[in-house]
Image (cartoon, helix red, strand yellow):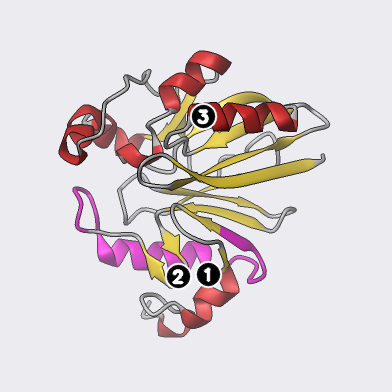
Amino acid sequence: MNIVRKSFPVGPLQCNCTVIGDTEAGIGYVFDPGGDATRIMATVESLGLRIIGIIHTHAHLDHILAAGEIHKQTGAPIWLHRSDRFLWDTLEQQCGMWGIPYAPVPEPAHWIEHEQDLECGGNCIHTPGHTPGSVSFYFEDSSLLIAGDTLFMGSVGRTDFPGGDAGLLKKSIQQRIYCLDESAAVVPGHGPETSIGQEMRFNSFVRADSRDF
């Protein structure tokens, strides 16, 4: 495999979208298309990929706004963890609360499972806490973690939205993320990239030496 990856902020809330794929096979995925469909598709085309999945790390509107247009242009199915279905069903209301126009999206066609493998070498990790269905994706050979809103540089995802659970979020990070390669880069849902090792040592919300399990 020859893995390529580009991550960049999109949409009104500057969600980090990632396009990743295998140029040898010519296939790839779009993670968290939170807006700017034209830019996302230009990136897909520049990498020479055929998108086979539009993957959402969770079902908050800022990670989904361009999903309908990306689906229209690629025909790729929508992926989501089933535990976030209740949030998916409120996308129009979420947009209304933030004053953002709602663009209809198709129903999820693929329910993501914990430890599910992707065709370009990634593996799904269920990391609930920010939402019940939050998932991260670890690409071991590329030393990369797409963390969604579970883990940020120096911070963690909010848990005061419906379905949030601070204790579960901490457990997800300590038991399912901090056990990965410390050198792996982390693409968070928003803001700059970091590394697992940096967050283990310096994240003031969840540090590796504060384990209580």
- Numbered label attached to residue 174: 2
User: Foreground residue, 198 or 86?
Assistant: 198
Q: Residue at x 39, y 34 (%)?
A: 64
Tell me if residue 200 can be seen. yes
**Residue 135 on image: x %, y %:** 45, 47
Q: Picture coordinates of residue 195 (x, y %)?
A: 59, 68
For residue 45, which quarter of the picture? top right
Q: Which residues are magenta?
A: 160-186
Distance Cα–Cα, label 1 vs label 3: 26 Å
As helix, strand or loop, the secondary structure at mark 2 comes to: helix
The residue labelled by disc 3 is 54
Q: CA distance from mark 2 to mark 1?
A: 5 Å
Q: Residue at x 20, y 40 (%)?
A: 98
- Could you tell me the amino acid type at mark 1? Tyr
Mark-to-mark CA distance, 3 and 2: 27 Å
Q: Which mark is residue 178?
A: 1
- Measured as percent of width and height from the top left, residue 54 is found at 51, 29
Q: Callout 3: helix, strand or loop?
A: strand
